Image: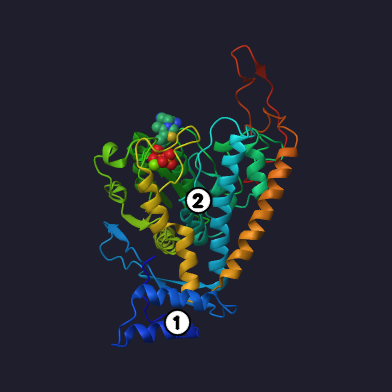
Amino acid sequence: MQVQPKKPTNHEGFCCSHQLIIYYIHHTQNMLLSNRMLVKMGQRLAAGASSNCRHASFEISEPFKTYELPDAKMPTKASLTKEQGLQYYKDMQMIRRMETMSSNLYKEKFIRGFLHLYSGQEAIAVGMKAAMEPQDSIITSYREHGWAYVMGVEPVGVLAELTGRALGCSRGKGGSMHMYAPNFYGGHGIVGAQCPLGAGVAFAHKYLEDKGVCLTLYGDGAANQGQLYEAINMAKLWNLPCLFICENNLYGMGTSTDRSAANNEYYTRGHYIPGIQMDGMDVLAVREGTRFAMDICREGKGPIMIEAKAYRYHGHSMSDPGTSYRTREEVQKIRKSRDPINQLKSRMLDSGMASEAEFKGIDKEIKQILEAASKKAKEAPEATDLYGDLYVKNLEGKLKGTTSMDYHDHQNIGKACNLD
Ligand SMILES: Cc1ncc(C[n+]2csc(CCOP(=O)(O)OP(=O)(O)O)c2C)c(N)n1
Ligand SMILES: [Mg+2]
């Protein structure tokens, strides 16, 4: 990672000796040391036992781009406490390892059907969650396991859902694409279908006057769908508190954005709706940009379009090796230069906010949590109430099963978590 040492801008001035050293060496004319050497030196210092820098400010490395926001003073820096940084690291690493574990469970045939992994895009879920207030809500596509986790589902709830167990967050009947939690409206398999639903959730926030904003996420492929543009029309007409967020991971199933989109600057595609483009692999940029856009929505000036530029490391789903429409070198290059977890870790090490030992400790804890969760999921009973709680109020009569001859009664078992 190319780090440019600069004077730290935290409120207390220099928060620790490592930053002071890096700053002064960089600014003397005796520039015999290259940046790379300085970085290594910072890392060595940071890798030492003590890491007492508790608060620092970092530059947003990839500046935000805006559309139709002429006076916008976009943030150029982000402040970070040690506790926040370690929490973001832990959450991103948990998502990454949970996806790797899911991939293994799929290969072992504990998970059947579809499985779309989020590896590479973790900073979007973690950064956006960090910007959310308790009343805000989110809705997304099928690439949603990480979102389920940040919205409060324990890893065992995710893994048990993926393996079709009653212990899962949708009691095993939703699987990979249909997870839910309080203020988390899924989990949708039809490309783009969540966009009008997200506008509807935003309408509810406005109607209830709860100051909530709905984060409506979709992919670059979904951005070419007509229903997105119907939804943004209504959202603008009623100034709904909605962020329409395009997670641009550069590919639909196997088609690059260059081949599928007449305009692949997705943040400009709302036409009469302002937009912001952010580096979706920098958790701090995501948090700051999202907070900025949410504030606009809370002032009654929504909706806003967001484009979060990211990359997916795995194929589109488990059946796609992901190498026929892009090269292995491309994947490796991005993993090496832009990985969201390594970026945050390097920043914290370089500024003396945390030591290697602390990161290792977190990794170990995550491994233990996931091993226990996987064991519990594998041993749990399979889902039974497949026709339970599909509706709060069933107006459909009997529900169709897997064939046209197969009908079942709907059962009301629990209470919807978003109803009082
Ligand atoms: C209406 C509809 N058309 C096609 C599909 C098949 N399909 C599933 S995912 C996908 C690509 C979507 O790409 P993108 O929106 O970029 O999301 P990503 O998978 O990259 O997260 C397609 C075409 C579908 N599920 N729904
Ligand atoms: Mg995509």
Mark 2 to mark 1: distance in Å?
44 Å
Q: Residue at x 75, y 34 (%)?
A: 381
- Quick check: 402 left or right of 323? right
Q: Counting other residues with Cα less than 10 Å from the Cα at mark 1, is it few (<14), some (14-19), or many (20 or more)?
A: many
Nearest the eye: 412 or 393 = 412
Q: Residue at x 64, y 39 (%)?
A: 161
Whether residue 207 is situated above or below residue 69 in the rendered picture: above
Residue identifier under label 1: 19
Which three-letter amino acid code belongs to the residue tagged 1? Gln
Q: Quadrant of residue 253?
A: top left
From the top left corner, tell me how far across and down residue 32 is, in percent. Answer: 31, 82
From the top left corner, tell me how far across and down residue 27 is, in percent. Answer: 32, 85
Residue identifier under label 2: 205
Q: Spot the residue most to the top.
A: 405
Nearest the eye: 10 or 102 = 102
Can you tell which of label 2 and label 1 is closer to the viewer? 1
Which three-letter amino acid code belongs to the residue tagged 2? His
Residue 304 in view, yes or no: no
Earlier residue among tags 2 and 1:
1
Callout count? 2
Q: Residue at x 50, y 66 (%)?
A: 345
